[in-house]
Image (cartoon, rainbow, N blue to C red):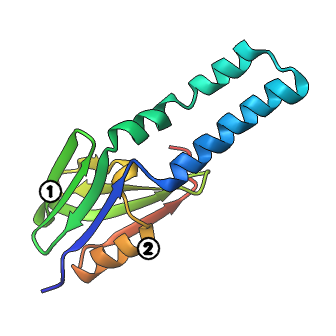
Amino acid sequence: MAEPFTFTRQGRSRRTLSVLILVYAGLIGLIVAVDAAWWVMGLLALLTLPALGDLYRNPSAGVRLDDNQLDWHSGRRKGTLDLAEIDHMRFDTRWDFSVRVSAMLTGEKRVHLPFECVPPHRDLEAAFQTRDIPVKRTHFSFF
């Protein structure tokens, strides 16, 4: 019987705060240094609203894998799968080198795990292999 594998991530992080500070400093610097149009910089600042929302709300995302089931949560979304339902796990490496994880069920269905709740893929792959769940990797597929 293996120890349960758990991973949790919070939306409020120093990395997010640091990136936002750098972006805002850069936008203000462009306004001051090169007299950039304030309204253009304001439109660019609008792109940071989702990150500001994460800092404010601090949503939690994570996954828990034990000997019987796989549970995940991301914000308001939640899911649970019995390990007996899973035929294999599929790890897709995308062109941006991110790894998307899907549970391929025995009934030809597929359940995608939300990206924000997935831990580092090597750790998750080792946890699945410990529980004798096959893992298939695909690299850089178009579809």
Q: Is residue 21 left or right of residue 52?
A: right
Secondary structure under badge 2? helix
| Image location of residue 75, percent across then percent down | 27, 42
Question: What amino acid type should be assigned to the residue bearing mark 1?
Answer: Leu
Residue, x 41% and y 48% (percent of image)? Answer: 12
What is the distance, in whole Å, between disc 2 and disc 1 at their CAs? 21 Å
Q: What residue is pinned by disc 1?
A: 81
Looking at the figure, which quarter contains the N terminus? bottom left
Question: What amino acid type should be assigned to the residue bearing mark 2?
Answer: Arg
- Residue 64: image quadrant is bottom left
Dot 2, crowdedness within 10 Å: few (<14), some or many (≥20)?
few
Q: What residue is pinned by disc 2?
A: 122
Q: Is residue 89 left or right of residue 122?
A: left
Secondary structure under badge 1? strand
Residue, x 50% and y 29% (percent of image)? Answer: 49
Nearer to me, 100 or 133: 100
Q: Which mark is residue 91?
A: none
Residue positioned most to the right: 34
| Image location of residue 85, percent across then percent down | 13, 60
Q: Earlier in the sequence, mark 2 or mark 1?
A: 1
Residue, x 26% and y 82% (percent of image)? Answer: 130
